[in-house]
Amino acid sequence: MPPPPPLDPSDNKAASPVLLPEAAASDTNPASPTFNDLGGTCPLPPATGQPWAKHQEETEEAVFLEGPRARLTETLMAFRVFCEFIRGFRALHFVGPCVTVFGSARFADDHPYYKLARAMGSRLSRMGFTVMTGGGPGIMEAANRGARDVKGRSIGCNIVLPHEQDPNPYVDRFVEFRYFFVRKVMLVKYSYAFVIMPGGFGTLDEMYEALTLIQTGKIKSFPVVLMGTDFWAPMLTFIRERLLRDRTISAPDVDLLFVTDSVEEAAAYIEQHAVGAFGLTRRSGTPARKWWLLEGFGTAKGTS
């Protein structure tokens, strides 16, 4: 199966229309499995993995958040954050329109949620999207692996934490960040949809970050898809019966979430609310890199 063709360099949210690659030949494959096909029965086995990330003795964020420091120190810190943003922009400029998949690092490859995320990663790639994750194990690995299964593009945005763990082996390119807030910007900036698989505090943080940006109009109303109806049911009940009842959110805010166990339903929703809503079109082409910006040097896979 040939890999999807490269994308035009104008592929970004500021351009209209944004171009997606031709659908891969695997579109002719049988329909993607549903959650039940993948063994999604209740109760599900617990996650068994360990926390992940590369080792760092003392996080610079912890130092930064300690309070006021010398003015020169604060200025140097701001410059370092600026440089990390620039490094991320350069590394991800040509990745094309993405869908970011969030989820726990602790699900093993025999878990139904891992299998569901892998199937979703494959389906997103066949739609022409680049699959972006946090680059770690568990759900992140599954989504990247699904993209690799159909020769789609797969990106990982890694974070440096006080735990030793390498990025998963299924990313075509991974970018490492020292600062969580920079990484979170990158995971949102290049994506036209967000798929939220079961996860813990980090997943909830990323989901509510996206919802808050949409709710407040800081980003457009990109689709947010929750997968794993049983897992998310208690949270959705709380949202509807507590937040909505007490008027801490409005009725339209509830509609920002689309909940399903079906890969095909999720794909159809993204097709309608991302591809259709934002006028994305599929085309072939090779992005033109600027030699005077030192673009195009190095391999397709690596760190930045």
Image (cartoon, grey):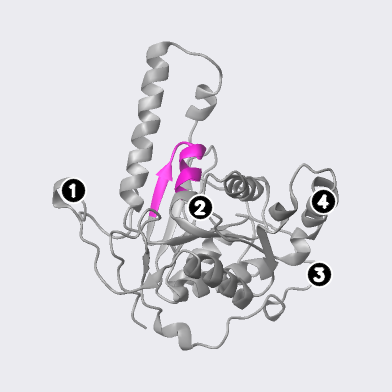
Query: In this figure, which residue is indicated by the disc labeled 2?
Result: 134
Residue at 33 percent across and 80 percent down: it is 2
**Magenta stretch containing residue 281, yes or no?**
no
Separation (CA) of disc 2 from disc 4: 27 Å
Query: In this figure, which residue is indicated by the disc labeled 4?
Result: 238
Separation (CA) of disc 1 from disc 4: 50 Å
Farthest left residue in view: 292
Q: Residues within 10 Å of mark 4 (few under 14, many from 20)?
A: few
Query: In this figure, which residue is indicated by the disc labeled 1?
Result: 294
Q: Please, what is the three-letter code of the amino acid marked with disc 1?
A: Leu
Q: Identify the element where label 1 is drawn.
A: loop
x and y, in percent, of residue 58 in the image: 50, 28
Query: In this figure, which residue is indicated by the disc labeled 3?
Result: 42
Separation (CA) of disc 3 from disc 2: 27 Å
Separation (CA) of disc 1 from disc 3: 52 Å
Q: Please, what is the three-letter code of the amino acid marked with disc 3?
A: Cys
Q: Please, what is the three-letter code of the amino acid marked with disc 4?
A: Phe
**Callouts 4 and 3 close, C-beta under 8 Å:** no
x and y, in percent, of residue 8 in the image: 28, 64
Q: Please, what is the three-letter code of the amino acid marked with disc 2?
A: Gly
Separation (CA) of disc 2 from disc 1: 26 Å
Q: Identify the element where label 4 is drawn.
A: helix
**Is 6 left, or right, of 62 in this rendering?**
left
Q: Earlier in the sequence, mark 1 or mark 4?
A: 4
**Callouts 1 and 3 close, C-beta under 8 Å:** no
Q: Nearer the viewer, residue 64 or 24?
A: 24
Residue at 47 percent across and 88 percent down: it is 28
Q: Which residues are magenta?
A: 174-186
Q: Nearer the viewer, mark 4 or mark 3?
A: 4
